[in-house]
Amino acid sequence: MVTEQLPAGVPTSLRRVDEARRRFGDFTDTYLAAMWQGDPLADAFVADFSKVGHGRAMRMLRTACREGIAAVPDAPETLRALFAELDRTPPWLDAERIYRDSRYVARYSRAAGIVLGAASLVSGYANSAASRPLEMTGRYVENAGARTIEVGSWLIAVNQPGGLDRFSDGFELTVRVRVIHALVRADLLRRPDWDSAAWGLPICQAYLAYTLVEFTLIPLRAMRQVGAPYLPHEVDAAYARWRYLGHLLGIDPSLLPRDAAEQQRLEEVYLLTRPPVDDYCRALVGSINREFLVPELEGVLPGRLARHAPAVVHALERLFLGDEIADELAIPSTRLTALVARTGPVLSAVNHALDRVPATLPRRARRGKAYEAEQEQRLRRDWGVQHDLVDASPSGGKPHPARGD
């Protein structure tokens, strides 16, 4: 178990724990205990890498994802145990309903791409402990574009029709993300500069569960703010999709949010207790803005408006994060925030009127899908990225535990 010989109690970097207990009761203690919990099944499989060999173990994992565990006759028992869980479909999963109820969400692909960076990813950078694995593996400031493309590739796969199916690309990528987390966790726990007393376990259950908030509650809210609101059944499908993805990622059932209310409770506890922002958090935001979001917006804004892309990015981030977190992250204040906030309801009214005409949905979704595909191809070309996840990225530069460097 990776949690052996770790300090007990609340990580010293957390704040306002007493207030969290007053407001959220027993759930706060569940959340705090999860600071010391990893992923027993994935962690046990990764512990076998030293015997099996990193490359061979990852090939076994991919084969088991694509063909089933029976196709890996020499699989270690730890891999068999992992797939015994992965192959059990939870009784609450209704994948066909998720596919049906989300078949037209691609109509808002343009807005969703900006929201992914300015809301989903940036929101995670307001926590110095949760961001520490990125810092210590050198995975973002060095190349914000590459990692954003990796995240985007995973999200595109899991949001495809059939993207949750057992032998889909979405299933494989999600399981590989889970094992990448375990590889990073094991590597950081061996390092003397990982401060367990301050930060808890690397990629702990508490922060892993919050990633569902980053990819569901936060983007859904941000899409409403920019005037691209999804229909009620699409919102429900998003929460159902990410509940299952959280299951595949190994999130403990005690923390796995089932709906919007449980995600909101998790977000509130996380934000209340999060460690303070540090210089690396600010560097992360500066990197994604400079290398990714601003160039992307320059390509979207027409004519001379493109020169205002940095201010628009800052306005969006302040709208999504709120002034307190934006100030901590040193995101410049801009009068455009108020303008963007006022524009959102107007666009919402227009899009809501369009959405009430069902005949428009398929055509708009097709256009969104075409934009999605073109965007991914362009980003991959511009950034020279051909792989999907970091475990398949080319060697060279700073070593990464997912590659076995």
Image (tube, rainbow, N blue to C red):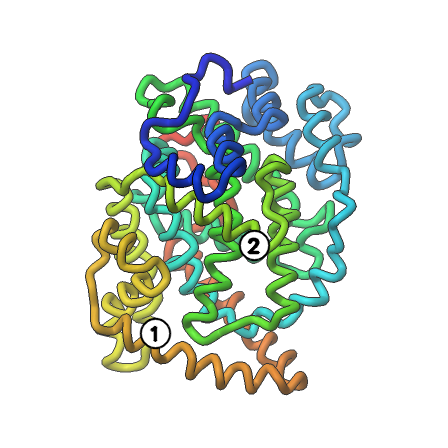
Q: Residue at x 78, y 45 (%)?
A: 91
Depth check, mark 2 against mark 1: the one in front is 2
The answer to whether any part of residue 376 appears in the image is: yes
**Residue indicated by mark 2:** 261
Identified by mark 1, the residue type is Ala
Give the percent coordinates (x, y) of residue 6: 44, 17
Q: Picture coordinates of residue 295 (x, y %)? A: 30, 64
Q: Position of residue 55 (x, y in %)?
A: 56, 27
Identify the residue under disc 1: 341
Tell me the distance, in whole angstroms, between the alpha carbons under discs 2 and 1: 24 Å
Crowding at dot 1, Cα within 10 Å, few <14 / some 14-19 / many 20+, comes out as some
Going by the numbered disc 2, the residue's amino acid type is Ala
Q: Nearer the viewer, residue 277 or 280?
A: 277
Residue at the image point whose x is 50% and y is 38% from the top: 25
- Relative to 222, does residue 158 appear above or below in the rendering? above
Q: Which quadrant of the figure contains the N terminus? A: top right
The residue sitting at 68% across, 51% down in the picture is 164
Q: Earlier in the sequence, mark 2 or mark 1?
A: 2
Task: Residue at 71% x, 25% y: name it.
Answer: 81
